[in-house]
Image (tube, rainbow, N blue to C red):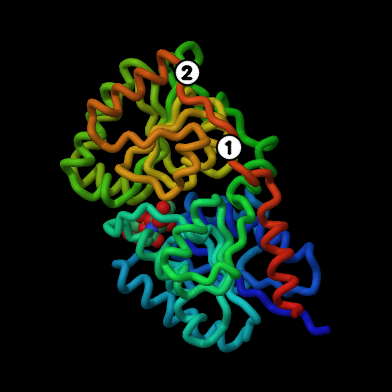
């Protein structure tokens, strides 16, 4: 029997740790030819190639080299460049992950050409349409045939939007597949922090990441957050790997100098294994990232989410995550609580067991052979 071809799509940093285990599992299940299209949404070595190397992802078969633009231009350009690839490859299915512009762009091209779409990490909803990712999630799910979900509540979200329940599969979390596989190789925090004069060895340290437009694009909001971090570092040394978007905003607002004191270590974006080691050793993680809410839950490290909502409620209900918003007093209070009591103890959510990608591959192999 000829192999069914699955065209996998990745484009931005959080896609890489999701696509890696899925591609490996699709290859292992047999009978499926696996191809990778990289849209080029992220292109810096630190945002892109280092992840391919550390996660041992095969080089993309096709690179669309799209780069950074406004949402409309980026999405349109991915669509324009993806269409001829789809025509040429003629796959049995297109597989997309997460909620970035590359996800919706390729799903839309495929659905219009009657190529069925598999969405990994379907059904997550923040119910906040001011987040570009929320729009990407809702629309990608409308276009998809297979909906692979990471937490049970996602099924209800999808059913409410009229999605056919027969295509919804609760498989667990591929991001956690990657975390569990690579945890033994995580780079110890001591190596990343070597030479930093702050008293982190005695006091411990917190990890900070910020990149959501709602937090970094408005200089006033960003200024308040920076001031909050400046106050926290007096109690707890902070390590802050800075996303390129955030780096530009900090510089433009003249805020980069405010944090350049002994208590905050500003770093370039880290590799996957460095970040994993850093999170593992942290007393607390302060972040607006979606993936890190899940990773901290898997690691049992307290997470304070600097947003008003989360699309990943299982990390709050069962994991170590607390959604604290962006109001300085509330953030400071939450940090004090963690320092005093060790933070929220959580448990590992159902099916976050390292085998999500295998379950996805089993479903796709069976359906594509039928
Ligand atoms: C994108 C995703 C977001 C995800 C984040 C993870 C969308 C809508 N957003 O946001 O969901 O959480 O990736 O990082 O898809 N830049 C570089 N080098 C790069 C890539 C980007 O310098 O390799 C800078 C550019 O100034 C660019 C800006 O970052 O304009 C934003 O990049 P973009 O891909 O549009 O969105 P992110 O903020 O990275």
Q: Under 8 Å from ligand 1: the CB of mark 2?
A: no
Q: Residue at x 74, y 71 (%)?
A: 365
Answer whether residue 43 is visible to the viewer in this image: no
Residue 91 versus residue 227 in the image, above or below: below
Residue 291 position in % (x across, y down): 49, 46
Where disc 2 sits, the SS reads: loop
> Of marks 1 and 2, which one's residue comes earlier in the chain?
1
Q: Which residue is mark 1?
A: 298
Answer whether residue 343 is visible to the viewer in this image: yes
- Where does the N terminus fall, quadrant-wise? bottom right
Front residue of this view, candidates 269 and 119 = 119
Left or right: where 194 falls relative to 104: right
Where residue 253 sits, quadrant-wise, is top left
Residue 242 position in % (x across, y down): 38, 41
- Where does the C terminus fall, quadrant-wise? bottom right
Residue 223 versus residue 364 in the image, above or below: above
Q: Which mark is residue 342?
A: 2
Q: Which mark is residue 110?
A: none
Residue 24 versus residue 55 in the image, above or below: below
* Count of numbered circles in the view: 2
Front residue of this view, candidates 236 and 259 = 236
Q: Residue at x 62, y 72 (%)?
A: 61
Q: Residue at x 29, y 67 (%)?
A: 70
Where disc 1 sits, the SS reads: helix
Where residue 24 sits, quadrant-wise, is bottom right
Residue 21 position in % (x across, y down): 66, 55
Q: Residue at x 62, y 77 (%)?
A: 93
Left or right: where 254 falls relative to 271: left
Residue 52 versus residue 286 in the image, above or below: below
How many C-alpha atoms fall within 10 Å of the one at disc 2: few (<14), some, or many (≥20)?
A: some
Residue 339 position in % (x across, y down): 41, 16
Q: Under 8 Å from ligand 1: the CB of mark 1?
A: no
């Amino acid at each position: 029997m000829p192999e069914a071809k699955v065209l996998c799509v990745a484009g931005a940093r959080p896609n890489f740790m999701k696509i890696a285990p899925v591609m490996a599992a699709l290859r292992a299940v047999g009978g499926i030819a696996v191809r990778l299209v990289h849209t080029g949404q992220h292109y810096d070595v630190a945002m892109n190639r280092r992840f391919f190397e550390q996660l041992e992802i095969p080089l993309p078969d096709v690179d669309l080299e799209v780069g950074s633009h406004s949402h409309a231009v980026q999405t349109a350009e991915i669509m324009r460049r993806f269409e001829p690839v789809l025509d040429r490859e003629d796959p049995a299915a297109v597989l997309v992950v997460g909620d970035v512009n590359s996800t919706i762009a390729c799903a839309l091209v495929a659905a219009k050409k009657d190529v069925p779409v598999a969405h990994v990490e379907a059904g997550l909803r923040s119910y906040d349409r001011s987040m570009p990712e929320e729009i990407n999630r809702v629309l990608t799910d409308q276009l998809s045939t297979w909906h692979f979900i990471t937490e049970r509540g996602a099924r209800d979200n999808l059913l409410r939007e009229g999605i056919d329940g027969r295509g919804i599969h609760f498989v667990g979390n591929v991001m956690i597949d990657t975390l569990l596989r690579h945890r033994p190789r995580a780079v110890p925090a001591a190596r990343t922090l070597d030479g930093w004069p702050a008293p982190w060895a005695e006091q411990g340290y917190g990890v900070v990441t910020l990149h959501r437009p709602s937090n970094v694009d408005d200089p006033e909001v960003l200024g308040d957050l920076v001031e909050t971090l400046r106050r926290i570092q007096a109690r707890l040394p902070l390590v802050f790997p800075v996303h390129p978007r955030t780096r530009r905003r900090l510089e433009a607002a003249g805020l980069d100098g405010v944090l350049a004191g002994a208590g905050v270590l500003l770093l370039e974006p880290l590799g996957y294994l460095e970040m994993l080691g850093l999170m593992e050793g942290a007393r607390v993680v302060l972040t607006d990232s979606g993936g890190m809410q899940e990773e901290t839950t898997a690691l049992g490290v307290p997470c304070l989410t600097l947003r008003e909502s989360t699309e990943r409620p299982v990390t709050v209900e069962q994991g170590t995550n607390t959604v604290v918003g962006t109001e300085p007093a509330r953030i400071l209070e939450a940090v004090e609580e963690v320092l005093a009591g060790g933070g929220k103890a959580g448990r590992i959510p159902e099916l976050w067991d390292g085998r999500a990608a295998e379950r996805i591959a089993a479903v796709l192999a069976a359906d594509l052979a039928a």
